[in-house]
Amino acid sequence: MYTYKAAGVQIGVEKVILDKVLKIIQWDKNGGGTFATGGSLTNFMSMLMARDAFNAKIKNEGFQQNNLTVYTSKESHYSIPKNAAFSGIGRENVRYIAADDLGRMDVDDLKNQINKDIAAGYHPVLVNLTAGTTVFGAFDPITEAAEFCTKHNIWLHVDGAYCGSLIFSNKYKHLLTGLEKADSFSFNAHKMIGTPLTCSLIFTKDKKHLYNSFDNEASYLYQTDGDDFNLGKTSLQCGRRNDALKFWTLWKSVGTKGLENIVDHQFELADVAREYIKNNKDYTSYGIENSISVCFNYKGIDPQKLCTALYEKSEILVGFGSNNGNEFIRFVTINAQNEKEDILNFFKKLEDFVEEHGFALKDSSLKIIS
Ligand SMILES: Cc1ncc(COP(=O)(O)O)c(C=O)c1O
């Protein structure tokens, strides 16, 4: 996928998808994008663009002196500290910002931390917001953070790996209000949209940043056609699979309305689960509304032990998570091929399992009896 000469019309497939998404998020013709092999790497690309936008010398000379800092919520994905290590910024220069009870970044804490760092001589270069945090599926407040980032000239990235695909939903896209103020935005079509792995996209408000960070002269490759068609100039890798084709074929087959239905259906399934929990006194809910992560406990049973027992007995694969000291089962309705019955079946299976294996209520030293 690095040159038109090598990839031919496949370049067009990628460009069509990028242009269509840019229109949907309403970024103008200066915007650009590319595909990478996952949300960890699109987050990495955002960090590199932020670093290079701050100081283009670093990519040539390396760090002469490193006092760059990046900001992300404590609920964000673990790729952020990894990427800080890869980019030379360093794990210790990642500031973890508090989240509120609903799992959203506390923007006051963000402002305080940035002001403190500036006063101490650091250079904040990146604020990473999450659209769909890993545990709660919460949405960090973009508008409030963006104002502050603009004031201090800090790159604002929105990591929508998990839930950024709701740009296709008229009903839920308000959860991304303020996206037009971000410098970059990424999402995984291989998550909510359900394309085969891998299919991850990143967009920048101004495509010059993609060239600034990812272009490199290679006269043995770039021999024909313009930069616009030689996509290796804006991508992390050189050779790449045509990930866009997976998205293109799906989009062609179901249409934009079909993509919207895929997204909305996952929220409907989550509502089914939340409603079930609400109406059944054996369940305690911990999650939030407007999310496809449904968090709960059943009969006060230790969620780690229950999830592990379900796994070891090959009954249900479901994970647990925690927030503000509470631990709970985390049930994610990301498979749009499921129906209401599948969700109800999950709860039935869970309840039958507890019944059958004799889990004691609120017993922290829980054991499977049979
Ligand atoms: C919020 C968030 N960011 C980034 C990632 C990483 O994406 P990938 O697994 O495609 O590297 C994930 C994946 O779980 C995620 O939920």
Image: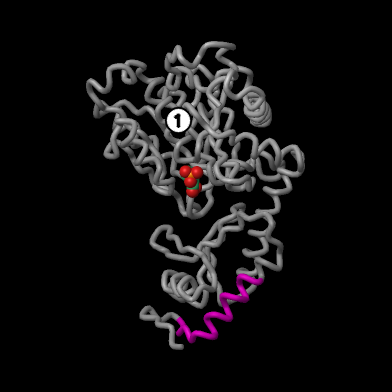
Q: Which residue is mark 1?
A: 46
Who is closer to the viewer here, 250 or 90?
250
Residue type at tag 1 = Ser
Instruction: Quadrant for the N terminus, please.
Output: top right
Q: Position of residue 232 (x, y in %)?
A: 51, 22
Left/right placement of residue 268 relative to residue 204 reads right
Residue at 41 percent of width and 39 percent of height:
108
| 298 in relation to 259, above or below | below
Picture coordinates of residue 306, whole percent (x, y) = 46, 74
Q: Is residue 23 left or right of residue 356?
A: right
Give the magenta part as a residue range.
345-361
Residue drawn at (63%, 64%), measured in percent from left and top? 273
The x, y position of residue 90, in whole percent, is: 28, 35
Q: Nearer the viewer, residue 158 or 15?
A: 15
The stretch drawn in magenta includes residue 348: yes
Cβ(mark 1) to ligand 1 < 8 Å?
no
Q: Is residue 139 left or right of residue 87?
A: right
Please say whether residue 313 is one of the residues in the magenta stretch.
no
Q: Could you tell me which residue is drawn at 61 percent across and 72 percent down?
A: 347
250, above or below 236, in the image: below
Quadrant of residue 166 within the rendered picture: top right
